[in-house]
Image (cartoon, rainbow, N blue to C red):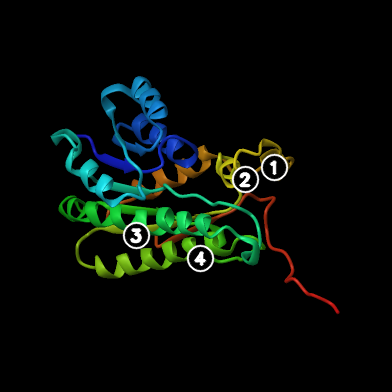
Amino acid sequence: MKKIALITGATAGFGKSSVKKFIEDGWGVIATGRREDRLLKLKEQYGESLHCLKFDIQDSSQVEAAIKSLPSNFENIDLLINNAGLALGTAPAQQCDLEQWNTMVDTNIRGLMTLTHKVLPKLIETRGAVINISSVAASYPYPGGNVYGGTKAFVVQFSLGLRSDLHGTGVRVTCVEPGMSETEFTLVRTKGDQSASDKLYEGAKPMTGDDIAETLHWIATLPPHMNINRVELMPVNQSFSPFQVNRS
């Protein structure tokens, strides 16, 4: 019987690469996202191995309805990959758009919480696993990171709390914290500014969606008595800078 993975934010980046990786390894995958056209393309590509759920993760009623709609051959979820998330804006806090802050909180925190809450009973039944995607921004602040970094710090602490609460159930919980990765992340953050994205990644040899998918697959396929609590990844060309100093 196929194992089933539910992957949020499956239409691009880490999520799309993970769909490919897990299906190639024989898993059944539930792919979620807001962009129906992209979900349909995934379905055309992977056929019966893939079940698509279209919903906005910010809307709890849509999340609940989508999970309840799962057909019997996809309802016994073995793995939840909470990948859906976004950053919006690069301005300092005093110049930020409050609506962008709210959207990041509603997606990266509330959406992740809601979906996890709905899926946990199934994961306990299957003695499955949760992999939450955070970011190095959870640990290392940078100018303009403000609320995005805060939401990803929540993901880290929430993952540790889940691990503690699920003690004795056999459910594994991991938080993955990637650094610079070339996906649509910067395009979303800058409202489609391709030049900003190109400038950020130029010559940097960033990680790719496939790199992260390999890591997620490795975690998911470890022996069930092993739990990876946290994984932090960066490309070799990314490291740490000195603290800022304002000199008067």
Label 2: which residue? 190
Is label 2 in a helix, a strand or a loop? loop
Badge 2: residue crowd in 10 Å (few <14, some 14–19, many ≥20): some
Mark 2 or 1: in front is 2
Amino acid marked by disc 1: Ala
**Residue at the (40%, 38%) spot, across then down:** 10
| Label tally | 4
Badge 4: residue crowd in 10 Å (few <14, some 14–19, many ≥20): some
Disc nearer the start of the sequence (4/1):
4
Amino acid marked by disc 4: Gly
Q: Are marks 2 and 1 in contact (CB under 8 Å)?
A: yes
Q: Position of residue 51 (x, y in %)?
A: 27, 31
- Residues at marks 2 and 4, CA–CA distance in whole angstroms: 19 Å
Quadrant of res 136 = bottom right
Q: Is residue 72 above or below residue 67?
A: above
Label 4: which residue? 150
Is label 3 in a helix, a strand or a loop? loop
Viewer-nearest residue: 180 or 36: 36
Amino acid marked by disc 3: Asn
Q: Is residue 239 above or below residue 217?
A: below
Viewer-nearest residue: 30 or 62: 62
Amino acid marked by disc 2: Thr
Disc nearer the start of the sequence (3/4):
4
Disc nearer the start of the sequence (2/1):
2
Disc nearer the start of the sequence (2/3):
2
Rendered image: mark on residue 196: 1
